[in-house]
Image: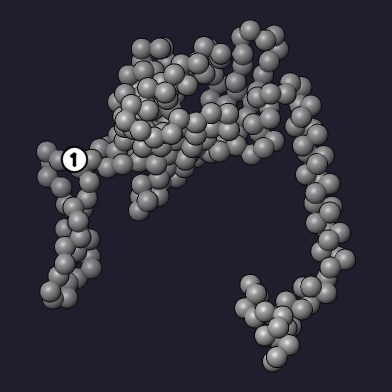
Amino acid sequence: MEDPVAEIPRVIRLLTQSQPSEQRATIEKYFTPSASFVHPFCRTGSFEGSRWLIWCIYRWYKIMSPRIDLNINAVVYDEKNLTLYVNMDQVFRIWLIPFYNAPVSLVTVLKLVRYPPLPPQPSYSTPVNPNEQNRSLHRTSPSEKPLYYIQSQNDLYQVNEFVKFVSQFGVLSGLLLLYQFVATALCVLGATILWPVSWVEQNVVGGNGEKSIVEAAKG
C-alpha cells in the first residue's frame, strides 16, 4: 500500500467479499510472508510462510459465509508506530444453518512494515534544526517510493460481540448483558461499603500508592 488509510477499506473488502483467486492474490500482495493473525477463535503465530495459514483462515471464513455484509466506520493511522486501527460492522451468516445471523462490531489492529525502511538516524556533531533533520530522514527518491505491508492482524471484539458467533437469537448476549449490569451493581456496592479505603488514599497515602500505610503512619 502506498497510502494505508485510503487503501485499507478496499483491501478489507477484497479479503472478505472477493472470489477465491482474488482473495489469495490480495493476501500475497498486502501481507508479509511471516505475517500473523489473531482472532478470538484462532491464531497463526509468525514465522516464514505463516501467510499461508492466513489464506486458509480467510478461505474457510468465506466457505462458511459466502456473503458478508460489511461497513467500515473509521480508519485511524498511528504513523509513528506504523499501526492502523479499523472500526467496522459485519454480518456473518453460515449457509448450512438456517436463520443463522451474527451482526458484530470489531476493531482490527493492523501492524505495518515499511519498504524501504527509514534510514537510521545519523549522529550530528553540531546542533541541527529538528525540522531539517526530520525532512532528511523521510526523503526518498522517486524509485524508492515507500510501500506498506501488513505484518500482523489482530481482530478485537468485545465479549458481548464475539459470543454472537456461537449463540443464536441473542441468548448468550442477553445473559452477558445481565452479568455486566450485576457486575456494575457490585462495583457500586463495593465503592459504597469500602469508602474508608478511598478516604485513606486521599488523605493519608496519596494517589497511586505514593506512600505505603507504614510510611504514612511514620509521618
Which residue is at a point 68% across and 30% down the rendered structure image? Answer: 163
Q: Nearer the viewer, residue 123 or 6?
A: 123
Q: Position of residue 67 (x, y in %)?
A: 54, 14
Which residue is at a point 84% across and 46% down the rendered structure image? Answer: 182
Which residue is at a point 37% across and 26% down the rendered structure image? Answer: 51
Q: Element type at marker 1?
A: loop
Q: Is residue 111 left or right of residue 166?
A: left
Q: Is residue 124 left or right of residue 100?
A: left
Q: Residue extending furthest bottom?
A: 219
Task: Say which quadrant the C terminus sits in.
Answer: bottom right
Q: Is residue 53 above or below residue 36?
A: above
Q: Nearer the viewer, residue 1 or 126?
A: 126
Q: Nearer the viewer, residue 45 or 163?
A: 45
Task: Say which quadrant the N terminus sits in.
Answer: top left
Q: Is residue 60 above or below residue 177?
A: above
Classify residue 175 by image quadrant. top right
Q: Is residue 15 above or below residue 38?
A: above
What is the crowding at mark 1: few (fewer than 14 residues within 10 Å), some, or many (at least 20)?
few
Amino acid type at mark 1: Lys
> Which residue was labeled with disc 1?
145
Q: Position of residue 92 (x, y in %)?
A: 60, 20
Q: Is residue 92 above or below residue 116?
A: above
